[in-house]
Image (cartoon, rainbow, N blue to C red):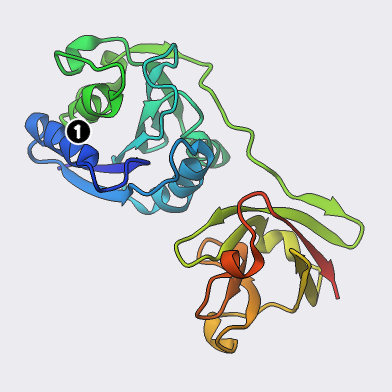
Amino acid sequence: MRIITLLTDFGIKDGYHGVMKGVIWGIAPEAKIADITHQISPQNVLEGALAFDRVAHYFPPGTIHVGVVDPGVGTSRRPIAARLGEQFFVGPDNGLCTLLVQRARRQNEAVQFVKLDKPEYWLAEVSNVFHGRDIFSPVAAHLANDVDLNDLGSLIDDPQMLQIPEPERIEDGWRGRVVIVDNFGNLSSNLRREHLAGLGDVKVEIAGQVIHGLLRTFGEGRPGELVALFGEAGDLSVCVVNGDAAQRLHAGVGETLLVRSS
């Protein structure tokens, strides 16, 4: 019994994620389906890649991750599937799996890609605007039914990869940027715990505000206080205790933050 995850920018209003589940269960009725999220910002491939990176490795070996954040649907953009260590990815060739690939390679795990060009594993009719339903869902279901990855398409070695924004070392600390704004308005950055190792006590500068020191958890701050702490994925985050940092600071993805020794 295989697990198939779904990550999309569809939202939940229109039933697009629901029809994908129907297609999967029509082919692989024993599959278990887990929703990672359907609330990725429309067409935001980087946000989808970051969400996959935070979640996918918690799933067991054999899990099949289906990603549909696909602004290039119906164009020359290739549909692909991949073996990434002990897990699989199915989706568009637009960099959505970049961080999953990087994680697998860091761990010296096998990485293999195929271009999905075997329509016998798709639905009979394929829309130009909904490959999530017509190609990616049936391919994932066939994988769950133990069809070999190599049978689903032709091997490729040039998948599209995103340029992931990296922090910049400065004289007395680091310059980073906000990469995610979550549902609470917390501003998560591309700075991680390991970047700040050795800096000692720090101050965080963002949107004209200075935060002195880091908290361990929200409860150490006062309601309404602007704070900095490491989030659940080890990323440096700027938050308002019981509030919304994005709204308070009028800040979003791309906002610069500086971390310096204090």
Q: Where is residue 92 in the image (x, y as percent from the top left)?
A: 40, 25
Q: With 42 as the anchor, is 220 left or right in this view? A: right
Number of numbered callouts drawn: 1
Q: Is residue 38 above or below residue 159?
A: below
Q: Where is residue 206 in the image (x, y as percent from the top left)?
A: 74, 64
Q: Where is residue 136 in the image (x, y as percent from the top left)?
A: 28, 26
Q: Is residue 198 above or below residue 60?
A: below
Q: Residue 155's quadrant in the figure?
A: top left
How would you rate the neighbour count of disc 1 (Cα within 10 Å): few for under 14, some for 14-19, many for 20 or more?
A: many
Q: In this view, does 34 lie above or below 92?
A: below
Under mark 1, the amino acid is Ala
In front: 70, or 92? 70
Q: With 36 as the anchor, is 218 left or right in this view? A: right
- Residue drawn where x is 69% and y is 53% of the image: 177
In front: 192, or 74? 74
In front: 165, or 14? 14
- Residue drawn where x is 48% and y is 36% of the image: 109
Of the 4 image quadrants, the one containing the C terminus is bottom right
Q: With 39 as the anchor, is 126 left or right in this view? A: left
Residue at the extreme right of the image, as rendered: 171
Q: Mark 1 points at which residue?
A: 144
In front: 35, or 196? 35
Q: Residue 250's quadrant in the figure?
A: bottom right
Q: With 227 as the anchor, is 129 left or right in this view? A: left
Of the 4 image quadrants, the one containing the N terminus is top left
- Residue drawn where x is 57% and y is 66% of the image: 247
Q: Is residue 63 above or below residue 58?
A: above
Q: Is label 1 in a helix, a strand or a loop? A: helix
Q: Residue 143's quadrant in the figure?
A: top left
- Residue drawn where x is 37% and y is 49% of the image: 39
Q: Position of residue 113 (x, y in %)?
A: 42, 21
